[in-house]
Image (cartoon, coloured by chain):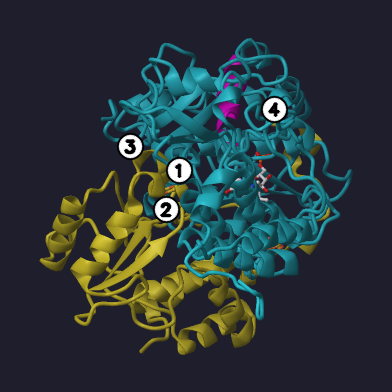
Chain colours: A yellow, B cyan
Amino acid sequence: MSRLNEANVILAKEIIGRYPKARSATIPLLHLSQQQNGYVTNEAMAQIAQLVGATSAEVLGTATFYEMFKFEPVGKYLVNICGTLSCALMGSETLLHHAEEKLGVKAGGTTEDGLFTLERAECQAACTEAPCLQVNYRYRYKVTTAELDELLDDLAAGRLDGEVPPHGTVARVRQHIPADKGVGAVHPDAVVAPPAWITEGAK
Amino acid sequence: MSRYAWAPGYTDDGDRPRIVTSRFQYEDGYTLDRSLATGGYVGLRAALGRTPSEVHDEVRSATVLGRGGAGFPAGTKWGLTPQGVWPRYLVVNGDESEPGTYKDRLLMERDPHQLIEGCLIASYAAGLSQCFLYIRGEMALAQERVAAALNEAYAAGYVGKNILGTNFSIDIVLHWGAGAYVVGEETALIESLEGNRGMPRLKPPFFPAAIGLYGKPTIVNNVETLSNLPWLLTNGAAAYTAIGTETSPGTRIIAVSGHVKRPGVYEIINGSTTFRDVIYGEEFCQGIRDGHELKAFIPGGGSAPWFLPDQIDLPFEAKMVGPAGSMLGSGAIMVMDETTDIPAMALTLVRFYAHESCGKCVPCREGGTWLMRIMERVVAGRGTQRDLDQMLEIGQSITPGQYPHAASERLGLAAAPFPFRMTTICFVGPSAYNAVDSALTLFPDEFQAKLMKRTSIPVTAVGADS
Ligand SMILES: Cc1cc2nc3c(=O)[nH]c(=O)nc-3n(C[C@H](O)[C@H](O)[C@H](O)COP(=O)(O)O)c2cc1C
Ligand code: SF4
Ligand code: FES
């Protein structure tokens, strides 16, 4: 079950086809499997390894380097409260403590109902809108404790289902390169000459 | 409250030239329709009407300083690829995660076509045959906007095979990261793009332009750097250099955060605008929040040494900020007022860099964690003088010799300018120490005040007669 389903295998092959070397698709495919299952499983990593021509250990090695990949189930909503300087100056610590109390878990923990995982996150590139947070990588800016309460209540009641997809889904729009429009990836060693417009000029 | 609700943080309504943020005023600025209606892809057409080397010369003569942190001129960088080695690649650095930095995300969310056009112009000029647009993993909306824009641009014939009916053909591949600050370092970005752990490569070679993606010549440019190119090709290098100063032409986007009245993202005139202008200026941040005064500010992101108020009249000019002991970095100004608990706030930065160490170099991996642990102890009121000395010792193991810092009349300090020596592969290690060094050098009393008081335990030598 936790292997990529048929539709996702087709998508995976499309993604691999864009890169001059299949291994470059490792991170995109890990995202794809996390989108399907909510976290990254051993079976999925073994399958990705086959697809990109790496060993399972290599895929595991890559996956564990990155913060966003989870290897066990996390809450449906991952609440990341920024704690870096600009947000700390504007009271992010209070916000985090408030969230810990409201959810009854420490940062890093998941609520018993499996709905929320709370994390102290690092700078989210929204520093002028401090303190800020992300729920499944969707932003909330200049968040007060009251707004945080409201947000958590809304999420729990399913009122934000349209805006915030379950954990695992990051972007909901994907790139698709139509077969007749794309140039196509070429293995780096197969290219020996400069591109046409360099030798001939644009025409 | 932002005047442009759809561009959170963009409050800029000053009457200044706009090179890269001109479409932020439109709610639909990210669509192909709006882009085309407002001069989109005109720069690309202008480029395709000239030879690649002419376009390269135009960019070179405009001195477009890299906006990713190092400030290296784009035209010069493109010229560093070895002759006769193919293919060459373009990797776009959209990993924005330096503390305080907020600009590339807005550029991707609000004007993805401008970025795409910039990628095309760079690829045409430098003979790059495939482009990878690496967006930070946590930026869902930016990924969606760039994906939608690429889909539109492919359908309309602006990207892909035979662009605008010419023999210029290139794919732009959208790639997402998965959360790691160090991946913003260009060689780590390349490792990540090859499917590996995002660890920086040993240097030399100092530039991926020689050996980059798949071992081939690779240009790595920042999102904002590339976003300058459409305007530049549309209006010409002379118009570009007419804005800003000779050594810092054009504009740059800055993000001002912290204790100011109106934090926000502004496109400022490069080189001549001063920190006083942006912190106190009416069209910018309008001063420190009510009833408070400036204590310190960071001029160029979490990795930059801190400035005291007496440096406020410095302009956004690397040639002046460098000798004063800091750097402009990624255009992130973080402002602290007199209520700021300096050790506690420095700890947030130390924690950031310790957390983001990739682990390849011992001084960074161990030193960063030690600094964080000691800082935690000091901030919690359990530190000792020995802890403070220990932090300086750890600093010496990461950056032997003097670390850059600003001058302070009050403390009788002369500025220690860049460069510094380092024992690590990249700047994450030195950056972990940077916050400690700045805070401890400029505000020693605040650390002393937090040290554990032992006064309640009388020290009596054994056998001493009272
Ligand atoms: C630790 C570290 C993190 C960096 N993060 C970024 C980043 O997030 N975005 C970026 O454009 N450049 C970043 N840089 C700078 C890049 O290495 C590189 O200089 C830059 O992308 C080149 O583009 P430019 O010449 O257009 O500025 C970082 C550098 C270091 C050492
Ligand atoms: S300095 Fe730190 S982050 Fe940079 S390469 Fe070394 S260990 Fe990795
Ligand atoms: S410090 Fe919180 S978003 Fe940058």
- Seen at 31% across and 60% down, the residue is A96
Cα gap from disc 1 to disc 4, whole angstroms: 24 Å
- Seen at 53% across and 39% down, the residue is B116
Cα gap from disc 3 to disc 2, whole angstroms: 14 Å
Residue at the far right: name it.
Answer: B83
Q: Quadrant of residue A112?
A: bottom left
- Secondary element type, mark 3: loop
Closest to the camera, between mark 3 and mark 2, is 3
Residue B193 showing in the rendered view: no
Mark toward the start of the polypeptide (3 vs 2):
3
Residue B224 lies, with reference to residue A135, above or below; the image says above
- Secondary element type, mark 1: helix
Cα gap from disc 1 to disc 2, whole angstroms: 7 Å
**Coordinates of residue A154 in the picture (x, y in percent):** 13, 60
Q: Which residue is mark 1?
A: B105
* Kind of residue sitting beneath label 1: Arg
Residue range corresponding to the magenta coloring? B226-235
